């Protein structure tokens, strides 16, 4: 794992996009690369989206300047909270800009979901002091742990209960026991979350290579039934002459078998499975969802 601080910062500062954005900032503007891109960079994983925190000028206005400079597409996401997106010309990579929440970078990153996503790098002079990791996110990355920054952050946005399993499915990390306790406490609040947001996390969960084992864990703590209440009825259907497992276990096992078979398929088939069927939705996700719901 590439958690060497100097290497991590050097990679960011050699990034042409970040350098270009910094050149467009006002003199006193503080610019930070934060969240998933930094996390993925630390574990040598390709990421197509970058999140920037902007302090000292309007994030929306900076995004407009960047879009013009790179000949990308400007998208206003939230005028009230000063959030905008630039879709790069390749329509694959995109840049999100948000005004700094609170008075300092620490105020902003301490309101994020998990420690592994609360790492920030200041786009400045490339010194080691440019890295901000107040929640020991790099340490949790090294150990493969998903840990919430705080209980309140989970309560404030219950979707993060599902996001924990999504990241576990994608990264193969284990959810910290204390975070699981918080998920048990706030999982029922998931019903208050917009279904569109839930759908995005579900699609990404099913996309992961460790989906079936996380579905099993979600079954054990009941989170699965907050999303698919129909599946709770399957618990009552026992093994029979046609199935050696109970119905719900059989359904989850179907997803597991898809994951096993995926590793034995020819390269062209795997490439097709991992291509988009629709906007950001891969065939593999749809196949696993069909597997879970086939009965």
Image (cartoon, helix red, strand yellow):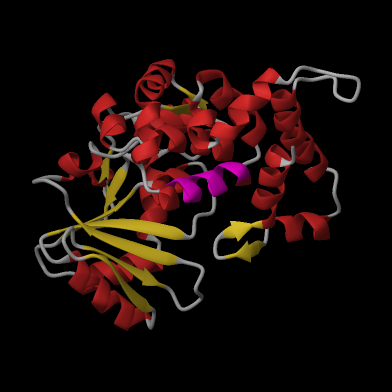
The foreground one among 87 and 295 is 295
Q: In the image, residue 237 lies at what x, y percent?
A: 73, 21
Name the residue rendered at 42%, 38% in the picture. Answer: 4
Magenta highlight: main SS:
helix
Side of 1 relative to 103 (left or right): right
Q: Is residue 14 magenta?
A: no
Q: Can residue 1 be seen in the rendering of this structure?
A: no
Spot the residue most to the right: 241
Which residue is at a point 62% across and 31% down the rendered structure image? 231
- Quarter of image, res 188: top left
Rendered location of residue 287, percent (x, y): 72, 49
Front-lying residue, 139 or 265: 265
Tell me where the magenta segment starts and ends, as one range.
198-206
**Residue 94, how many percent across, how many down?**
42, 66
Image quadrant occupied by the C terminus: top right
Viewer-side residue, 144 vs 275: 275
The answer to whether 141 appears left or right of 75 in the picture is right
Does residue 101 appear anywhere in the picture? yes
**Which residue shows up at 54% across the image and 30% down it?**
224
Residue 39 x, y percent position in the rendering: 43, 43
The relative height of residue 171 versus residue 40 in the rendered view (above or below) is above
Q: How many marks?
A: 0
Residue drawn 90% across the image and 25% down it = 242
Residue 242 lies left or right of residue 56; in this view the side is right
């Amino acid at each position: 794992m590439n958690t060497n601080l100097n290497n991590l910062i050097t990679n960011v500062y050699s990034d042409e996009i970040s350098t270009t954005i910094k050149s467009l900032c006002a003199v006193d503007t503080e610019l930070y690369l934060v969240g998933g891109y930094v996390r993925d960079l630390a574990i040598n994983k390709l990421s197509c989206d970058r999140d920037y925190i902007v302090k000292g000028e309007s994030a929306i206005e900076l995004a407009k300047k960047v879009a013009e400079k790179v000949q990308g597409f400007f998208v206003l996401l939230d005028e009230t909270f000063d959030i905008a997106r630039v879709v790069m010309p390749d329509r694959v990579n995109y840049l999100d800009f948000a005004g700094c929440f609170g008075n300092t970078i620490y105020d902003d990153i301490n309101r994020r979901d998990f420690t592994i996503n609360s790492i920030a790098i200041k786009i400045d002079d490339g010194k080691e002091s440019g890295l901000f990791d107040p929640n020991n996110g790099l340490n949790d990355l090294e150990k493969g742990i998903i840990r919430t920054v705080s209980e309140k952050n989970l309560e404030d946005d219950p979707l993060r209960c599902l996001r924990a399993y999504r990241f576990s499915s994608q990264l193969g990390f284990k959810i910290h026991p204390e975070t699981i306790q918080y998920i048990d406490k706030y999982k029922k609040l998931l019903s208050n979350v917009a279904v569109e947001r839930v759908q995005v996390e579900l699609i990404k969960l099913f996309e992961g290579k460790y989906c079936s084992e996380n579905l099993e864990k979600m079954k054990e703590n009941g989170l699965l039934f907050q999303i698919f209440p129909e599946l709770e009825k399957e618990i009552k259907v026992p093994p029979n002459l046609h199935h050696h497992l109970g119905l719900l276990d059989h359904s989850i096992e179907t997803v597991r078998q898809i994951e096993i078979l995926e590793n034995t398929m020819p390269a062209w088939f795997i490439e097709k499975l991992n291509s988009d069927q629709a906007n950001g939705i891969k065939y593999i996700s749809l196949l696993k969802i069909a597997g879970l719901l086939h009965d």
